[in-house]
Image (cartoon, rainbow, N blue to C red):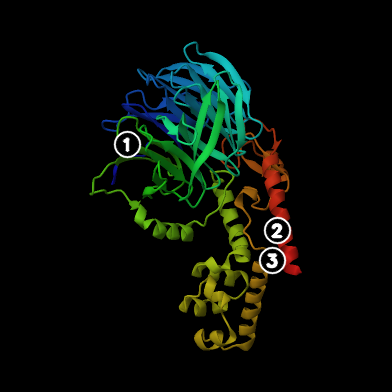
Amino acid sequence: MVELVATLADHIDDVNSCSFSDSLLATCSLDKTIRVYFLKDFKEVSFSPLRGHSYAVHCCCFSPSQSVLASCSTDGKTILWSMCNGQILASLEQPRGSPVRVCRFSPSSTYLASGASDGSVVLWNVPLLKFHRAGLVKDGSLVACAFSPGGNLFITGSSAGDLTAWDENMRCLYSDKSHDLGVTCCDFSPQPVTDTTQGIECYKMVSCGQDNEIRIWLISFDDEKGFDMRCKLTLSGHSAPILACAFSSDGETIVSGSIDKSVIIYAAKTGCIRHILTHHKRYVTTCALAPNQPLLATGSMDKTVTIWKLGRKSDSPGKFIPAPELSRYLLSVQRICPSRRLHHHVPPCEVNRKHCAGVRIKRKAEFDVESWTEDDVRTWLANESLLEVEPHFSANNIDGKELLGLTKDILLHDLKIESLGLRNKILRKIEDLKSKMKAVSSKIPEEFLCPITCDVMKDPVIASDGYSYERKAIESWISTKRTSPMTNLPLENLLLTPNRTLKMALNRWLDTRSEEKNYISS
């Protein structure tokens, strides 16, 4: 069973990352702070919160020696903190000052890797507190990083979907597309395994991404046989992009957190779901397992961190869903949050969110009428100037599926709409709706919609906040504002970089849509 132990609500903005040591838990947030708690009672240490970053803190991690905590931020810095007194030991600035999205220590604590929005990855010499080497991925921002337990290689993941393997001299060993539209997290199992097909020792790594999937990889590397990386298992369960994943210290458990607001606990060997936790009210952005205690920490955009005890207790007050109830849970999630892919996991500011809501309702009318609720039908009636029949529809609980099945007889005898002209008008509107449904058989993927206009992008560009926009829309925005439309934080610079990966995906989708339309018309 899973027991909810504590809920920490000290951050005043989205929680981005959390990390365990043997005795401490660290969390970081968009509120620019890092908070450190004792595991014995989950009270903050005397020097918490840690303040040193000028913008949002994206990631934090303890060194294997546990005496140092690293944090990285939009301000382009990775800061090393002493866990004795909370003092800053070093402030390491990314060579080009790009926002740093992820940082990780090597198992020996000799190196610290930091990955940034410009695709750069830097290896820092921790004992000397100085730059060691740097590399650059071919496309996208670096958002994920993990060292192998042996420390002789590490993996980075990018927003373009690539996983790239590097040795300790920053030599690129491997790079390939692994998750459609972006990797979000990766983590190694500390325990080596034997690949029975080749009879060699290798390591397991888990990765997750915007494609709603988790992949378990077998990775081996030595001077004689070189580097090898193969996908061993793909796990499904989440209904939306997955933002975080982690292995337990014994390598037997995998946890993941998603935009669908759930945390799923898997058996690493089989991929079977053990539990689904649905405590958070907004996107789950981070999850971590304690190294020597049965504790799980999850952080969310609801500004809270929850601590769970993993065990066999039967009196669990936490809201969890065992594997036998998975299908029922997934059906409820699909009704609340239809499966979709997102290019960004941070939502627009409130003004954009309200604007986009109306646009999505309009698009929903064109593509997914059968899944409409009664409220959606009432919205459609208002848009079509049919409010006078709304009481008849509400009294008969007409949802989307029933709307499509309405006939003249049903309108007259069941809904009691006596006006012939009104009945004919309703049926004409329904036929128009059916025609729109036939025009395109698939929904518009939300990653193709500009966060500012909520229209399909034609010329997507990446701004310095790491997010993609329609070029004309963001140019108009920054002509009057110098803040990010997605976070409301100041933009580091006004440089706009073409998002070629998204552009290619958009073109492929448009080609497919055109073929479908031609097929229907023929």
Depth order, front residue of 351/335: 335
One can see residue 389 in this view: yes
Dot 3 amino acid type: Ala
Label 3: which residue?
A: 439
Side (left or right) of 130 relative to 149? right
The extreme top residue here reads 128
* Label 1: few (<14), some (14–19) or many (≥20) C-alpha neighbours in 10 Å: many
Label 2: which residue?
A: 513
Are the residues at dot 3 and dot 2 in contact (C-beta closer than 8 Å)? Answer: no
* Label 2: few (<14), some (14–19) or many (≥20) C-alpha neighbours in 10 Å: some
Q: Where is residue 446 in the image (x, y as percent from the top left)?
A: 60, 51
Dot 1 amino acid type: Leu
Dot 2 amino acid type: Arg
Q: Is residue 217 above or below residue 22?
A: below
Side (left or right) of 5 relative to 426? left
Q: Quadrant of the C terminus?
A: bottom right
Q: Position of residue 37 (x, y in %)?
A: 33, 30
User: Helix, strand or loop at disc 1?
Assistant: strand
Label 1: which residue?
A: 295
Of the numbered discs 3 and 2, the one sitting upstream in the chain is: 3
Alpha-carbon span between mark 1 and mark 2: 47 Å
